[in-house]
Amino acid sequence: MKVEEIMNTKIEFIEANATVYDAIEKMVDKRIRSLVVKPRDENDVYGVITVRDIVFRVLNKNLDPNKVKIEEIASKPLVCVDKDIDIEHVIRLMEKFNIARVFVCEKGNLLGVVALLDVMSGSLIKRVRGGCIA
Amino acid sequence: MLKKLFFGGKIEQKVIGKIKKHIGILCSACETFRIALEKQDKNLISNVFELEREGDIVRREIVSDIFVGAFLPFLRPNICKFVEIVDNALDAVEDAAFEYLDLELDGEIRSDCIKIANINFKMCEILSIAFETLLTGEDLREKNLVIRIYEKKIDEIKHDLMRKLREKDIKNFWEGKIISDFITYLANVSDIIEDASDYLQIINVSIR
């Protein structure tokens, strides 16, 4: 099964100079666990900020989320894969880099994101479809 | 063992063959509709209507065979109900196809509708696999879960689609009604397939 079949094409973005509080608000409102950080300029690249980053790097250190900028804690660059890559490869990547999501990119454009939950669902679908198909 | 006990008789085998055919017709209708959307070929819609009529015929045959005496009495209502639900899914595909005749889809809305139609087709395939699994007496939980995963995906696309539609300029009442009904029917197919899958699980539990 290719990642294209399981990726989520709805990606939420945040500006690099926004505050962590802005990110918290967006994540809570939209019930999502990560946001893609927009590049600051044409020389910059996309990044990602996750709930994990916010909890461990800001809240756990008693820092004020209103004063910490996204760019200070965002991870860059994104771990990108091709849309034709197999789920197994994605699982290996996630395990190797200890990450919970990879991004699907094509010619510098972001097509989607595949999170652990998508991989888990995709693997189950593959298992079930591996049986007989009428 | 279960297969022999509950589904092993001659008349039962005949009905099972027809139920497989009925599910196959639903798969074909969903696939034809998906191709019609992808290729923007409205000539294919008549094939969907034909498949729905064929499905009606098969449903009547199944129900009459069951009332002639196929299956143990306690199983009959559940099997009839399952067949009716599959037929409702076929009706929903037909309703969506009918609305599509008067509709011009473009851009992201078209692409989202194709995604839904594609997932509907995949759900039919899993339903078919689940039915085969029922006959072997194995557990259906995994198949059921996959159908629920697909259904949730369609729900997400549908909500997104509704948001996009609200931003679209509608020229008159009928244009708005047709597109709204179209999306409702299209997304409803997956809900009905999920119901059918739940019913298979009920049958599975009842024969244990």
Image: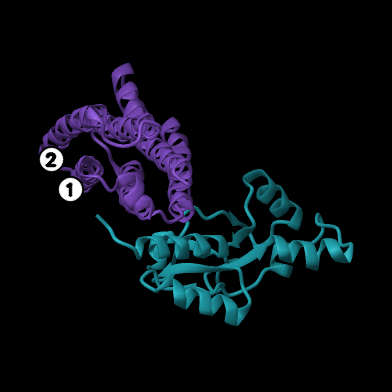
Colouring? by chain
> For numbered disc 2, what is the local secondary structure?
helix
Residue B85 location, quadrant: top left
Q: Position of residue A101 (x, y in %)?
A: 57, 67
Q: Tag 2: residue type?
A: Leu
- Residue linked to disc 2: B44
Packing grade of label 2 (10 A; few <14, some 14-19, many >=20) is some
User: Which residue is label 1 attached to?
Assistant: B39
User: Which chain is assigned cyan?
Assistant: A
The reply to whether dot 1 and dot 2 touch (C-beta < 8 Å) is yes
Amino acid type assigned to the residue bearing label 1 in the image: Lys
Give the vertical position of A94 relative to B88 (above or below): below
Nearest to viewer (mark 1 / mark 2): 2
x, y percent for residue B77: 37, 29
Which residue occupies 85% across, 64% down?
A: A60
- Marks 1 and 2, how far apart at CA: 10 Å
Residue B171 vs residue B146, the one in the foreground: B146
Question: Taking the image as drawn, is residue B122 in sight?
Answer: no
Q: Which mark is residue B49?
A: none
B159, B15: nearer the viewer: B15
Chain B palette colour: purple
